[in-house]
Amino acid sequence: MPQTNARLDRSLGTAGVLLLTLSITTPASSLFVIVPGSLQIAGTGTLLALAIAGVVCLATALIYAELSSAFPVAGGEYVMVGQTLGPAAGFMMLGVNACNNLLFPPVAALGIASVGSTVVPGLPPVPVAVGVLLASTLVGILNIRFNALLTGAFLAAEVAAVLVILALGLAAPARDVLPLLLHPVAPGTDGLVPASAANIGLATSVAIFALNGYGAAVYFGEEMHGASHRIARAILLALAGALLLEAVPVVAALVATPDLAAFLSAEDPFGAFVRMRGGSALALWVAAGIVVAIVNAVIACILANGRFFYATARDESWGRPLDAWLEAIHPRFGSPARATLASGAIGIAACFLPLRLLLVLSGTGLIAIYAGLALAAIVGRHRGSTAHGPYRMPLHPLAAVVTLLVLAAIAGLNWLDPAEGRPALLATLAQLLASALYYRLVLRRRGWNAALPACP
């Protein structure tokens, strides 16, 4: 039987946490599934968008690194915010994060059928998603070292798919990269037209989403040896890996594709590029690699979710019977088995909701989370609540200020989109308000606060 009041086993080094974090970042599926949207918006301006997004993500990664070294706790962002801005702000962060964490696995799993149709045509989205989530949840109960090795093996297949793009691009370049940067063009009604600053701005928000995931290292902080001293390195290495595995193949494909206009407007530009340059058999293997990448991301996210909800139960967030049940650690595997099962079950149930609704509910949660962390970094440094952390970001508070300014711009762009952006912003606001109300009416009376277990 699972044991309550038990701790997670410290069995991971930097490499294990890095493999798990890169699996959540999932560079290959980001390249094939998310980046095409940026290409359709900004064309070759995607290169500038990736460069700007890289700077923004570096700023955010530095914030994550400093806060995680001070609070390497499985609860992640809500603990960082709660310990610096107070319990009310911490639980508001918890509420938004819970929605985002729970919704990403079903959204990713529902996309497997469309990507996998290249390998097996006619896959039904919902049954495939349910099957993947069920299997991933059962795997997620197992020992974290086993899961680090498993996700590492899947990650190798994912990196191989990315390297195919890189190799095919470098083998036969058709144009120089400098004109693509200096004079970006985008798809228009009459062919290629100059990419506007607004298009590049929108593409930047897509690129930030594509690179996101490096901060997930903190969820494994309580299972990492010497987490306070090592976790910042894992976060920064994860961002560097995501940038290299996403930006460099984009450059290679743009330089090598013979028909730039067709590439930029294609629904599956990288798949088409592989078929054209390497043949249908190679394209089939690459498509299989992308499916593996998405499955790998689902497994890693469920692992992180289990630890997140274990931490929320340890902090007595949901009521004594449920908290005691979720807090239990499996005696053999050392994993938060029940919290993992619960998060997987909710993800499976979410597969039966419309995909558009899932996207709206999770659409702008990152804005709130990143903004909360930026404020936590500023206030934490000012009040000294992060002073015990061994990692200190350089040029403070530059990273936090840059992050807040960019987030304000992205929020403004989302508000101008009445179809998807504005409903997503309103959904995030509703999550914040509901969390604040729950804290005020229920948790404040109990003296709720984010716990800080010993994290050497």
Image: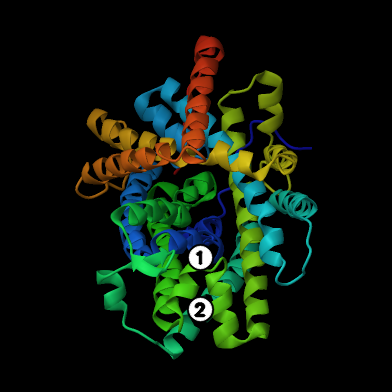
Give the quadrant of residue 344: top right
Q: Amino acid at mark 1?
A: Leu
Frontmost residue, 49 versus 86: 49
- Total numbered labels: 2
Q: Is residue 385 above or below residue 440?
A: below
Q: Check if mark 1's residue and mark 2's residue have beta carbons within 8 Å.
A: yes
* Crowd class of label 2 (few under 14; some 14 to 19; many from 20; radius 10 Å): many
Find residue 259 and name its label: none
**Residue linked to disc 1:** 31
Residue 138 in percent (x, y) is at 76, 50
Residue placed at 58% from the left, 74% from the top? 271
Q: Which residue is farthest bottom?
A: 172
Find residue 165 and name its label: 2
* Crowd class of label 1 (few under 14; some 14 to 19; many from 20; radius 10 Å): many
Left or right relative to 34: residue 181: left
Q: Report, in whole angstroms, how far the alpha carbon at label 1 lies from the one at label 2.
A: 10 Å
Residue 418 in percent (x, y) is at 47, 37
Q: Secondary structure at mark 1?
A: helix
**Can residue 230 be seen?**
no
Q: Is residue 346 above or below residue 383?
A: below
Frontmost residue, 330 versus 76: 76
Q: Which residue is farthest left?
A: 395
**Can residue 298 be seen?**
yes
